Amino acid sequence: MQTKKHRIKCKYRIILLLSIIVVVPSGYIIRFSQGTGIEWLGDVFGSIAYEIFWILLVAAIAPRISAFKVALGVCIATCGLEFLQLWQPPFLQAARSTLPGRLVLGNTFVWSDFPPYFIGSFLGWIWIITAKKYTFKSFG
C-alpha cells in the first residue's frame, strides 16, 4: 500500500514531467520559428525555456532538494557551460558537432546569454515552488 508521502512525491514528479512535456517543444518552437522576424528574441526565450527544462528535470529526479538549491545549481551549471564554450579542444569540438552536443554544450560564447539564464532560473524556481504548493494543497 502506498503511503500519503509516496503519493504526494509521485504526483509532484508527474506535474514536473508534464511541465517538461510542455516546456521542451515550446522552447524549440520559440527558438527556431521565424515568425517574429527577431532572431535574438527567439534566442532569449529559447534560453529561458532551456533553463526551466533543466530545473524541472533536476527537481523531478531529486524532489527532496529545495527549489532554491535546484535553481541555483542549474544556473551555475549552465553559466559554467557557457564559459566552457570559450574552450575549444578537439574532443569538445567533436561533441559540439553533434545535435545533442550542440544542444547541451552550445557552440558560441555570448555574454547576452546570461540574463536569460538568470530569468529562466528565477521562473524555474517559481515553477517548482508552485508545483509543490499545488501538490501539497491537493492532498491537504
Image: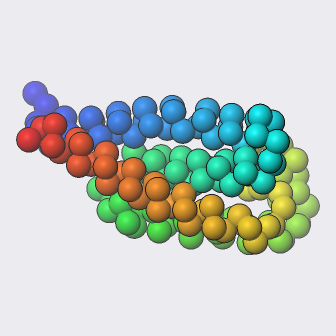
Q: Give the residue furthest to the right.
A: 90
Residue found 81% across the figure and 67% down from its top: 109
**Side of 68 relative to 37 (left or right):** left
Number of callouts = 0
23 or 37, nearer to the observer: 37
**Side of 18 relative to 34 (left or right):** left
Residue found 67% across the figure and 48% down from its top: 46
Residue 18, image x, y percentages: 43, 32
Residue 65, image x, y percentages: 33, 60
Quadrant in which the C terminus appears: top left
Quadrant in which the N terminus appears: top left
Q: Give the residue furthest to the top.
A: 1
Residue 23 in the image: above or below residue 106? above
The answer to whether any part of residue 15 appears in the image is: yes
Residue 112 in the image: above or below residue 136? below
Residue 36, image x, y percentages: 76, 40
Residue found 39% across the figure and 50% down from its top: 127
